Image (spheres, grey):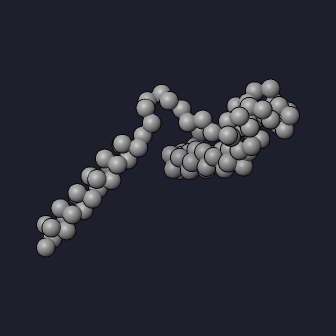
């Protein structure tokens, strides 16, 4: 019974991987969406930035970028606290 269940799970997972691989786009062929055209057309007017990437990172995704910076700062502070030496006088 246990081997049959394992075999069933293995076959199901293999079929899932094959279906996922078959649904991939060809390599190097990007997905064009309406959001691309919107960002390119409205980036300078809405974000006052000449660079579209800058407007996306710092204006449209500002809170996400702020969250990533907070996580990075917390990780660096944690590593520094973990690696500090206690009781060493300089």
Q: Residue at x 27, y 59 (%)?
A: 12
Between 37 and 81, the one lying in front of the other is 37
Residue 41 seen in render: yes
Residue 8's spot in the image, x, y percent? 21, 63
In the image, 47: left or right of 72?
Answer: right
Residue 85's spot in the image, x, y percent? 52, 46
Residue 45's spot in the image, x, y percent? 86, 34
In the image, 88: left or right of 69?
Answer: left
User: Which of the 4 image quadrants contains residue 24?
Assistant: top left
User: Which of the 4 image quadrants contains residue 10?
Assistant: bottom left
Relative to 55, residue 66 above or below: below
Relative to 53, residue 19 above or below: below
Q: Residue at x 29, y 56 (%)?
A: 13
Tell how many labels.
0
Of the 4 image quadrants, the one containing the N terminus is: bottom left
Residue 81 seen in render: no
Q: Residue at x 38, y 47 (%)?
A: 20
In the image, 28: left or right of 5?
Answer: right
Relative to 17, residue 7 above or below: below
Q: Residue at x 24, y 62 (%)?
A: 9
């Amino acid at each position: 019974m246990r081997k049959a269940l394992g075999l069933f799970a293995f076959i199901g997972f293999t079929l899932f991987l094959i279906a996922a691989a078959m649904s991939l786009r060809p390599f190097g062929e990007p997905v064009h969406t309406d959001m691309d055209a919107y960002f390119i057309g409205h980036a300078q007017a809405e974000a006052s930035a000449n660079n579209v990437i800058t407007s996306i990172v710092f204006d449209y995704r500002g809170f996400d970028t702020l969250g990533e910076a907070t996580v990075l700062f917390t990780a660096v502070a944690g590593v520094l606290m973990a690696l500090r030496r206690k009781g060493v006088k300089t």
